[in-house]
Image (cartoon, rainbow, N blue to C red):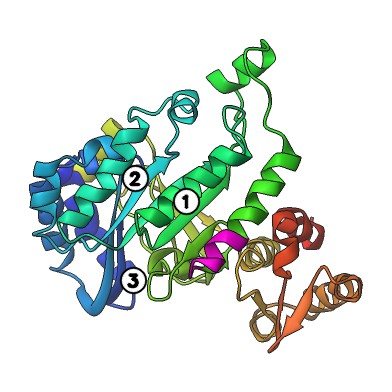
């Protein structure tokens, strides 16, 4: 697999016009199952074709149970300078429900070990609204995050996906379904609590202390070009074209061994680009740039948008600031619904 990924980097490096990278992200699945030597080898391969910005953010996604002492000690000697840890919860019952391999003690100790080796730029994932949890447990999760001095939090409501064990447990009455009212309460408590502890709420599900906002995700939310390498990885050229690698590992390797890119491509319609800009932009503190709308879309779409946002601005669901329209933070929990109201179908 490693040689195939290197081959893809070689074949696709010209797809990014900017050869100075500000962000590099090892994600998707569990990249921490790679050895440190393999991670270093991939970074060396990337540097054959790209230069690194002086303040580049290089993130590794990981699970707590992968972050043992030896792995972290070796990792601290590489260019990796940020960890995104799939903590999910510091409460064992939550972790059992989510079928996580780690327990609450490992979740905490993995963060402390990383910090001991100088890896202090850490983001943790936290899930709220679990039926195994309650408001007091959620507050304990957030307090634990502050006590551990974690500078970035990505947090999402527990959702019930089709054909999962959780769905079957709910159908069989073994566990109750997540309650939207409780998730709403926990979201707004988290928002105020983290802001009171020095975090910026810069995207609906993301909170970072100043200097610790995710550069990688911020570029995605601002529709900047990105290149995804590896099975299932997605790429975007910043304008009309989106592509993705096939998810079949053997087929991926076979094609690249024959110098064939295992890629499928989609040309985005004007409607698709508009809907995506609305969907992503309204999830952020910045909102949607009206100048960019006016420069990139037809008069019909501009007229449609102006008409649709007028009533929402009058009702207070949207607001305009510095020629950006955005959702006031008190309505962020409803952002997906508000955005979908503006979609062109």
Which percent across, then down, holds residue 108?
32, 42
Compared to residue 63, the image places residue 95 above or below, namely above
Q: Residue at x 55, y 67 (%)?
A: 196
Q: Is label 2 in a helix, a strand or a loop?
A: loop
**Percent position (x, y) of residue 18?**
32, 78
Q: Secondary structure at mark 1?
A: helix
Residue name at image x 89 percent, y 75 percent: 307
Q: Residues within 10 Å of mark 2 (few under 14, many from 20)?
A: many
* Predominant SS of the magenta segment: helix
Q: Which mark is residue 262?
A: 2
Judged left or right of residue 299, residue 13 is left
Q: Quadrant of the C terminus?
A: bottom right
On the image, numbered disc 1 is attached to which residue? 143
Q: Which mark is residue 323?
A: none
Residue with the mark numbered 3: 16
* Distance (Cα) linking label 2 and label 1: 45 Å
Name the quadrant containing residue 13: bottom left
For the question of whether residue 50 can be seen, the reply is yes
Q: Is residue 39 left or right of residue 139?
A: left
Could you say which is closer to the camera, residue 296 or residue 73? 73
Per the image, is 196 magenta? yes
Write the start and end of the magenta stretch as one range.
192-199
Give the mark toward the camera: 1 or 3. 1
């Amino acid at each position: 697999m490693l040689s195939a990924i290197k081959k893809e980097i070689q074949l696709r490096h010209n797809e990014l016009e900017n050869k100075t990278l500000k962000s590099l992200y090892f994600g998707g699945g569990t990249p921490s199952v790679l050895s440190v030597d393999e991670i270093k080898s991939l970074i060396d391969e990337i540097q054959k074709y790209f230069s690194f910005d002086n303040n580049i953010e290089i993130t590794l996604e990981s699970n707590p149970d992968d972050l043992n002492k030896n792995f972290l000690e070796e990792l601290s000697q590489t260019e990796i300078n940020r960890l995104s840890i799939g903590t999910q919860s510091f409460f064992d019952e939550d972790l059992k429900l989510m079928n996580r391999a780690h327990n609450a003690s490992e979740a905490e100790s993995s963060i402390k070990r990383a910090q001991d080796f100088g890896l202090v730029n850490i983001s943790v994932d936290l899930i709220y609204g679990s039926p195994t949890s309650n408001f007091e447990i959620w507050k304990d999760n957030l307090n634990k995050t502050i006590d551990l001095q974690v500078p970035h939090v990505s947090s999402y409501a527990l959702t019930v996906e089709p054909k999962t064990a959780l769905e079957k447990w709910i159908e069989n009455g073994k566990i109750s379904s997540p309650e939207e009212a409780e998730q709403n309460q926990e979201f707004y408590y988290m928002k105020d609590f983290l802001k009171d502890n020095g975090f910026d709420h810069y995207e609906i599900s993301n909170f970072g202390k100043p200097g610790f906002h995710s550069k990688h995700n911020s570029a995605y939310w601002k529709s900047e070009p990105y290149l995804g390498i590896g099975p299932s990885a997605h790429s975007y050229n910043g304008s009309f074209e989106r592509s993705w690698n096939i998810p079949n590992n053997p087929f991926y390797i076979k094609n690249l061994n024959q110098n064939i890119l295992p890629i499928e491509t989609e040309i985005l319609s004007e409607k698709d680009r508009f809907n995506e800009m609305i969907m992503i932009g309204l999830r952020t503190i910045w909102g949607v740039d009206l100048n960019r709308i006016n420069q990139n879309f037809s008069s019909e779409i501009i007229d449609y948008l102006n008409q649709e946002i007028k009533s929402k601005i009058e009702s207070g669901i949207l607001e305009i600031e510095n020629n950006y329209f955005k959702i006031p933070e008190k309505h962020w929990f409803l952002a997906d619904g508000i955005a979908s109201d503006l979609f062109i179908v």
